[in-house]
């Protein structure tokens, strides 16, 4: 057996949770991380001051909301949100599965509205 072979990630296994929202790393690429997200509810408004964030819709579709509009990603479509742009995501259908690509040290800053809703 060759221990130098890369690990295989099975996305179906990574999204088998039943939580309303799950987001965890599935791979590291240089100084970036690939995360998988499964959601049935919207994520809170936030921004990333030090990293762009790329979303790839895998199942169910994804809505990315911005202060002045939104975009909808069907499975197989992707879009990049530039660093510092306030946004939030929500499933297009009852649930969505997405891959997210961002810097491994990406900071997430909740918006003031998100902070007041958490209290």
Image (spheres, rainbow, N blue to C red):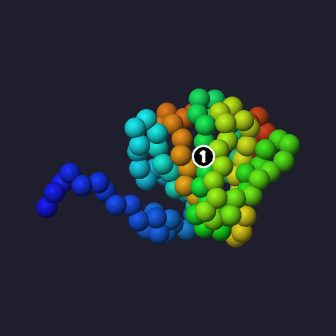
Residue 93, quarter of picture: bottom right
74 on left or right of 58 = right
Could you tell me which quadrant the C terminus lies in? top right
Q: Position of residue 104 (x, y in %)?
A: 47, 37
Q: Residue furthest top?
A: 50
Residue 42, quarter of picture: bottom right
Q: Position of residue 13 (x, y in %)?
A: 43, 68
| Mark 1 neighbour class, 10 Å CA radius: few under 14, some 14 to 19, many 20 or more | some
33 on left or right of 50 = left
Residue at 49% across / 33% down in the picture?
Answer: 105
- 51 shown above or below 43: above
- 52 shown above or below 89: above
Q: Position of residue 34 (x, y in %)?
A: 48, 48
Seen from the viewer's position, the closer of residues 47 and 19 is 47
34 on left or right of 39 = left
Residue 40 visible in the picture: no
Could you tell me which quadrant the N terminus lies in? bottom left
Residue 68 visible in the picture: yes
Which residue was labeled with disc 1?
54
Residue at 59% across / 55% down in the picture?
Answer: 56
Residue 48, quarter of picture: top right
Q: Secondary structure at mark 1?
A: strand
Q: How many marks?
A: 1
- 114 shown above or below 6: above
Q: Residue furthest left?
A: 1
Residue at 46% across / 64% down in the picture?
Answer: 11
Q: Position of residue 23 (x, y in %)?
A: 54, 53
Seen from the viewer's position, the closer of residues 111 and 89 is 89
Residue at 63% across / 29% down in the picture?
Answer: 49
Q: Residue furthest front?
A: 77
């Amino acid at each position: 057996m060759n221990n130098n072979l890369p690990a295989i990630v099975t996305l179906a296994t990574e999204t088998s949770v039943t939580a309303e929202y799950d987001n965890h790393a599935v791979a590291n690429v240089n100084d970036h991380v690939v995360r998988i997200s499964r959601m049935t509810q919207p994520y809170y408004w936030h921004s990333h001051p030090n990293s762009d964030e790329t979303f790839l819709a895998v199942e169910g579709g994804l809505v990315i909301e911005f202060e002045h509009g939104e975009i909808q990603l069907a499975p197989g479509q992707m879009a990049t949100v530039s660093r510092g742009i306030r946004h939030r995501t929500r499933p297009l259908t009852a649930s969505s599965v997405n891959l997210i690509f961002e810097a491994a040290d990406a900071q997430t800053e909740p918006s003031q509205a998100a902070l007041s809703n958490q209290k």
